[in-house]
Amino acid sequence: MPVWASFRGSPEMTEGSIPIQETRVEQDVSQHEVQQERRIADRDRPDLDLGAYGRELVQEMLWSMLLSRRFEEKCAEAYQMGRIGGFCHLYIGQEAVAVGAIRALRSDDYVFTAYRDHAQAIVRGIEPRAVMAELFGRVDGCSGGAGGSMHMFGADVNFMGGHGIVGTHLPLAAGVGYAIRYRGGDQVVLCFFGDSVVNGGPFHEAFNMVAKWGLPVVYIVENNAYGMGTATDRVASVEQLVTRGHAYEEMHAERVDGQDVIAMYDAVTRAADRARDERRPTFLEAVTYRYLGHSMSDPAHGTYRTKEEVQGERKNDPIATFCDRLITQGLLDQEDYDRLDQAAIAASEDAAEFAENSPHPDSSVVYENVYRDEYLGGLDRRDAWR
């Protein structure tokens, strides 16, 4: 069995100290199981010549997915050891979405995302060391240790966060799109968000603006089947979330296999061209799946989804399936894979060691970037200027 095939059946992680319990919410179970079968049946991968994309690009995509996976595994280990505090949402299982989408952008394009942001930050170009140091709350973190897991930022690579409040970054992405149009630029804004956002007000407000004004924004909903612990089909009034985009006449809407890095790359390439050339925004529903819980405080299965469901989805692991395709077409061999995987593991270990040795921020900076002017009070006194 090839090494990468282990991703299809890697050991379960019982995140945090929460034990696995074989219980399940019974309400709407049959309906949800039907929806899951439809999600899997919808994946129809064309027999593409991956060599046409170039050996360098496809191996770079594989490397990025491996780095994202190994980095997140290291995050889980560090969290369980108490090195990472607060909320921590891992991206394991969804790597093809970020890698395929971001690789389709130019270096001067912009990226927004929600709080499951470690992989997007790394793929966009923030160093793994800086991302891990931010997770550890250290001064060498990409946000100076002030943001933590949910607030990665990198202005030098146009990575605009890392946003913890559900859905509120969609209007921000629209604002950057407006600024691009106002200044006469041709950059594109890529904005990731979770499936629960489509039921909120900011979603519709932002979509209406970008469609009406023809702003260069590509919105991607990462439909991993659950909003926290609630199945998407229990709360959404549409069977496919892409349907929401059809309400806006000037917006192109498309459903994509989010477990296929090439499908994501192609879809975002088309969307970026559409934004630059036709002044039309795009809404992509990336059908994906997270193999672990919503956050590190949430078990992988046993509460709102079954072990069998998770194991079934693991058979479609985006890294394993991509490796199989590359091997079949002669674009990858065991030596290539070992080299890439060992480099990803080494980079993740190095990032953790770097973060451990980075100092904590001094307490004197706690009010920086909070008040416009210098804070006049001390740490023992709030709002002295009042």
Image (cartoon, grey):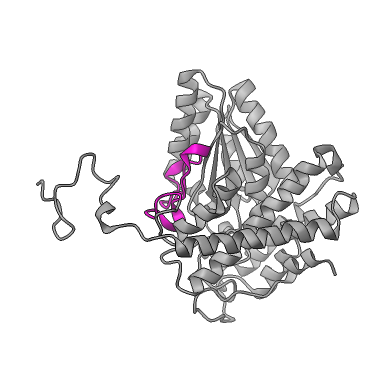
- One can see residue 151 in this view: yes
Give the residue furthest to the top.
184
Front residue of this view, candidates 177 and 66: 66
Q: Is residue 215 left or right of residue 361?
A: right
Residue at 69 percent of width and 43 percent of height: 264
Per the rendered image, the range of residues in magenta is 142-169
Residue 26 sits in which quadrant? bottom right
Front residue of this view, candidates 183 and 360: 360
Residue at 61 percent of width and 42 percent of height: 243
Vertical position of residue 68 compared to residue 303: above or below: above
Image quarter in which the N terminus is found = bottom right
- One can see residue 71 in this view: no
Say how many tags the image has: 0
Front residue of this view, candidates 282 and 84: 84
Front residue of this view, candidates 150 and 310: 150
Residue at 53 percent of width and 24 percent of height: 214
Residue 166: x percent and y percent?
44, 51
Vertical position of residue 160 compared to residue 236: above or below: above
Vertical position of residue 213 compared to residue 271: above or below: above
For the stretch drawn in magenta, what is the main secondary structure?
A: loop
Q: Is residue 168 magenta?
A: yes
Residue 16: x percent and y percent?
50, 75
Residue 380 sits in which quadrant? bottom left
Residue 137: x percent and y percent?
40, 60
Residue 170: x percent and y percent?
47, 40
Q: Is residue 341 left or right of residue 187?
A: right
Vertical position of residue 303 compared to residue 338: above or below: below
Q: Is residue 260 magenta?
A: no
